Image (cartoon, rainbow, N blue to C red):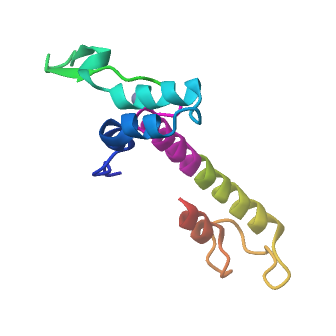
Amino acid sequence: MPQPKVEVADIFRRDGEAWRAANAGHVSPTQRRVMTAIEICRTAALGGHVERCEECAHTRIAYNSCRNRHCPKCQWSAAADWLEARKRSTSAIGVRRAKTALSSGCKSHPATAPAGSNRSSHGGNEVAEAFD
Ligand SMILES: [Zn+2]
């Protein structure tokens, strides 16, 4: 998934302070903390760390994350992981449902063909492959 060209953090860093000043009294302390966390996420303000590959000893310096649950930068990878996991589990459910439907048959195409046979247009192998 490509990274967005403009991030929420960019907008907050550019206009956040002016927006907070213009909306003083309408922004809760929690909302201010979230905005600040997003503004300083993965910047020198939070410090950094060095990552080193155990195989080739390649090193990479990276800034620390804010880990705020409202931060799109921090939650983006968690959301991508969640989406990938749902895709895998949905795919597995699709295969199970297809096999269940085939074993019980349907009104116009009863499940009379042996498994793996191509006699029926609803052959088990054909449908199961469609969900893989
Ligand atoms: Zn963050």
Q: Quadrant of residue 18?
A: top left
Q: Can residue 41 be seen in this view?
A: no
Horizontal and vertical percent for residue 94?
Answer: 65, 59
Asked if residue 52 lies left or right of residue 1, the reply is left
Camera-side residue: 7 or 21? 21
Q: Position of residue 50 (x, y in %)?
A: 22, 14
Question: Picture coordinates of residue 132 (x, y %)?
Answer: 53, 59
Residue 35 seen by the camera: yes
Answer with the quarter of the image where residue 97 lies. bottom right
Range drawn in magenta = 69-88
Q: Which of the pair 41/74 is nearer the observer?
A: 41
Residue at 38 percent of width and 34 percent of height: 17
Task: Report the residue at 46% width, 40% height from top.
Answer: 22
In the rendered structure, does residue 75 fall within the stretch colored magenta?
Answer: yes
Q: In this view, does 131 lie above or below 82?
A: below
How many numbered markers are drawn? Answer: 0
Image-based side of 95 in relation to 112, left or right: left
Q: On the rendered structure, is 60 left or right of 38?
A: left
55 left or right, relative to 125: left
At a point 31% along the width and 26% down the height, the residue shown is: 42
Magenta-span inclusion, residue 130: no
Give the main secondary structure of the magenta stretch.
Answer: helix
> Is residue 14 placed above or below 57 in the rendered structure?
below
Give the residue at the far bottom of this rendering.
108
Q: Closer to the camera, 128 or 51?
A: 51
* Residue drawn at point x = 32 percent, y = 51 percent: 4
* Looking at the image, residue 42 lies above or below residue 128: above
Ligand 1 visible in quadrant: top left
For the residue pair 124 and 55, the one nearer the viewer reads as 55
